[in-house]
Amino acid sequence: MATLSIHFNPAVIARLASASNDDTIHVTLTLGGGEPSAEAAATVVPHGPLAALMQAGLLEAGAELTFHQRRANRSGRAVVTADGQLIVDGHSSTFPSPSKAAEAVTGNVINGWTLWQTREGVTLDKLRSRLDAQ
């Protein structure tokens, strides 16, 4: 009989422990023993608007993006997937672009490139400018 063993990074456990009932937590499982195989890693290729940032190393899969709009009293959180999509808290499907992800949170057509920020406070638009400057 096969055995499934799941090991979580302590940061994941801490995030799960601090989650409220309204939080959506996405967990990605990688099957294999230890390091993912080169074959598995090669099958996920970023595409779409974020692909160039990811391929240049300016944005990584698993990166957390956030925004806060004080006047509207709303905020959002998204995670970048390995294929360049965005998983937005509270939504079951992924979004292909920063603007579509921002629209899902705000309910308005909005420029997600200038709204979403990395943990360091850098907007996706600034990352895109850095890429253009290279």
Image (tube, grey):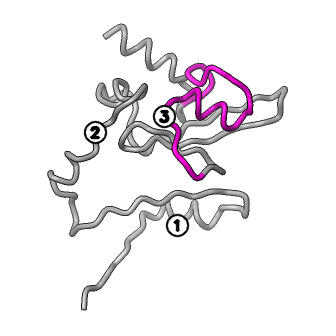
Tell me the amino acid under the disc marked 1.
Answer: Ile
Q: Secondary structure at mark 2?
A: loop
Residue tagged 2: 45
Residue tagged 3: 96
Q: Secondary structure at mark 3?
A: loop
Q: Is residue 85 left or right of 119 when viewed as pictured?
A: left
The quadrant of the picture occupied by the N terminus is: bottom left
Nearest to N terminus: mark 1 or mark 3: 1
User: For residue 100, which quarter of the picture?
Assistant: top right
Tell me the amino acid under the disc marked 3.
Answer: Pro
Q: CA distance from mark 1 to mark 3?
A: 28 Å
Q: Is residue 60 placed above or below 123 in the rendered structure? A: below
Q: CA distance from mark 3 to mark 2?
A: 14 Å
Please state the extent of the stretch shown in magenta in the rendering: 92-117
Frontmost residue, 45 versus 67: 45
Tell me the amino acid under the disc marked 2.
Answer: Val
Say which residue appears at 55% left-offset and 23% top-offset. 123
Q: Mark 3: few, some, or many residues within 10 Å (few <14, many ≥20)?
A: some
User: For residue 53, which quarter of the picture?
Assistant: top left
Q: Is residue 50 left or right of 13 when viewed as pictured?
A: left
Q: Is residue 53 left or right of 73 when viewed as pictured?
A: left
Residue tagged 1: 13
Q: CA distance from mark 1 to mark 2?
A: 28 Å
Q: Is residue 65 placed above or below 22 in the rendered structure? A: above
Does the magenta run of residues contain 106? yes
Farthest residue toward the top? 133
Comparing marks 1 and 2, which lies closer to the viewer?
A: 2
